[in-house]
Image: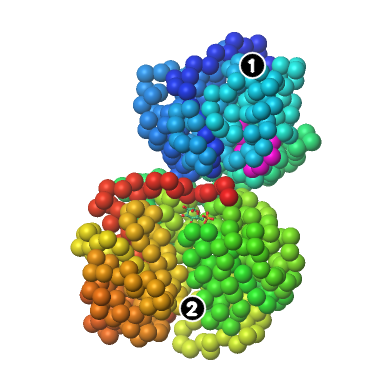
Amino acid sequence: MTYDPTKQTREAAVVSYRHCQPSEAVAMCGIIVRAGVDDALDELVAGLENLEYRGYDSAGVAVRDDEGSITVCKREGETDALEAALEDRKLDGTLGIGHTRWSTHGAPSDENAHPHTDGANRVAVVHNGIIRNHDALRSELREAGHEFTSETDTEVVPHLVADALDDGADPETAFRRAIDRLEGSYAVAMLVGDDDAVYATRHGSPLVLGLGETANYLASDVPAFLEHTDRVVYLEDDDVVVVDGDSYRITDGDGTPVGRSVETVEWSAADARKGVYNHFMRKEIDEQPVSLRQTVEGRIEADRGVLEEFPPGSLTDVDDVVFVACGTSYHAGMYGSTLLRRRGIQATALRANEFAHDPMPLTERTLVVAVTQSGETADTLAALRAASESPAQTLAVTNVVGSSAAREADDRLFIRAGPEIGVAATKTFSSQVAALALLADRLEEDGAGSAGGEAASGRTVTADLTSLPNDVETVTNDEGAARLAAQYADAESYFFIGRGVGYPVALEGALKFKEITYEHAEGFAAGQLKHGPLALVTPATVVVAVFTGRNDDRTLHNIREAQSRGAPVVGVGPTSATAVREAVDEYLEFPDVNPNLAGMLANVHLQLLAYHAAEIRDRAIDKPRNLAKSVTVE
Ligand code: G6P
């Protein structure tokens, strides 16, 4: 599909904005644009449903009909509320934009929902990101007589465009003039009443073009339109794309045409659907045997990691590794750093937001690895950018091929986990750790492990990765976590402890538990319990202890400290750990496995524990309050 400039007819139009409710605000958010030959609304709403993991405070759509009228409908709440509002409304038109919002500034409200329009109702805009200079722009526009109906940064954009249109600019020029004034990060899409194309750009926030048979799409992420097409163009920062039902054109910030390759997404539409499951989270937990196989497929030969991305000798100039990441990805980075240190490779994991603005000394022999499922987390991108400005080498370990992290890092390693929709990351954690374990082989062989790692005894970590998917399946079929979630439903606090690779797993278990149950949950290094947290332990504190088959005797000491304060202890460990089984009050077991990988199996039990505890409490498991999957603001 190519862009045909003759299709850019400018219809004289009567524009009427019929707001079914006022709305607005700022965010990370999800954008969907649909330009086709038949009505856009249904596909817009379906796209919003698929993007809800990016935000669910409010949702809205704007549709342009054949006469050039734009109708906006937006509602506070999840997409359901918007759908209810749309039930008795008619939004005909082949061109539309939609938005689902996660608030970072200003309360979720109808007023702060997108799309936003200008005062004269000629322009409708959706936006993901933050416009940092919106206060200054708003003051300037107010002085020029513009009136605003929301508190959002976004609302300045349609007003800026309207000003340029009033000055006689055509829509594309008006759009460019408006975005030239913006500072911050944004993906923006715009409808203009008297034009039959959508204008969009990105600068630090994701936007991908989808090319269908009978319609074209733009979205913050591929699942928004995956039902309709798998042919995509990943836009670069400052690209301006003009798209209608059967053509598109991409130019750079100066208006020079640029060629961007059309790629085929390997994810299937079924991957992005819930199927028989009640929640994406449970589906994604159960998918781990498959996603893990995908991660390692073709990447293990003779029990060693062979990464196409890193042929032998490609990492000979690396002495030390620094992982930067957030949330679950940070825990995967911690896990990876432990695996590397055990191989004699100097490695550290830092929270991306801390590293970004307070970086550590880096040399040209340091490899900074940004671990990020989405590849769009603002804190992680900031850390990656800080590293790029240092002499260090950079690598993105990510699930999203066209993501900002993948494009900005010197190198990239894809975890191939498939789309993850549940806000609570599950399958991507195990795939991240598996990918980092494979990377460890290359680093070690290329000499980064000169500090003297552990002698390989018996099977290697990589060899055991091959059988890990079957072991994960044993855990996903286990009903122990469901039983214990019910048994301990009345506890006041949930503490998770572990050591070695069990430590990041304890942190991850606590994160999962608190984010979807809203109960008090904390993770600690097992040995730290006695240095403070023990003061909080009472009979109403459930202590979940991770055992990996390595240094378990020490963790046994730690659980006794808790038990003597009356706390019930749930052990999570290998089948053959008899001493552990005898010491704990309850036991969740997993198949005996290389201790380096045992944390990954324990983690699946903890995912299930959190899931069932949230289910009992009837929580919004896939869309926990105040959270979003991909946080594209710092
Ligand atoms: C948010 C999500 C977490 C996720 C983190 C990092 O906080 O709620 O689930 O782990 O971002 O996301 P990333 O896409 O960089 O892995």
Query: In the image, is the residue at mark 2 within 8 Å of ligand 1 by its beta carbon?
Result: no
Image-based side of 423 in relation to 313, left or right: left
| Residue type, numbered disc 2 | Val
Q: Position of residue 289 (x, y in %)?
A: 40, 63
Query: Height in image: 315 above or below 522?
Result: below
Image coords of residue 617 (percent x, y): 26, 51
Majority SS type along the magenta span: strand
Image quadrant in which the N terminus is located: top right
Q: Position of residue 186 (x, y in %)?
A: 63, 40
Name the foreground residue: 607 vs 634: 634
**Residue 113 appears left or right of 175:** left
Residue beneath the point at 27% across and 64% down: 481
Asked which secondary structure carries label 2, the reply is: helix
Q: Which residue is mark 1?
A: 194
Query: Circle 2 sits on which residue?
Result: 461
- In this picture, which residue range is highlighted in magenta? 182-189
Q: Is residue 269 visible?
A: no
Residue 443 vertical position relative to residue 626 in the rendered view, above or below: below
Mark 1 secondary-structure assignment? loop
**Amino acid at dot 1:** Asp
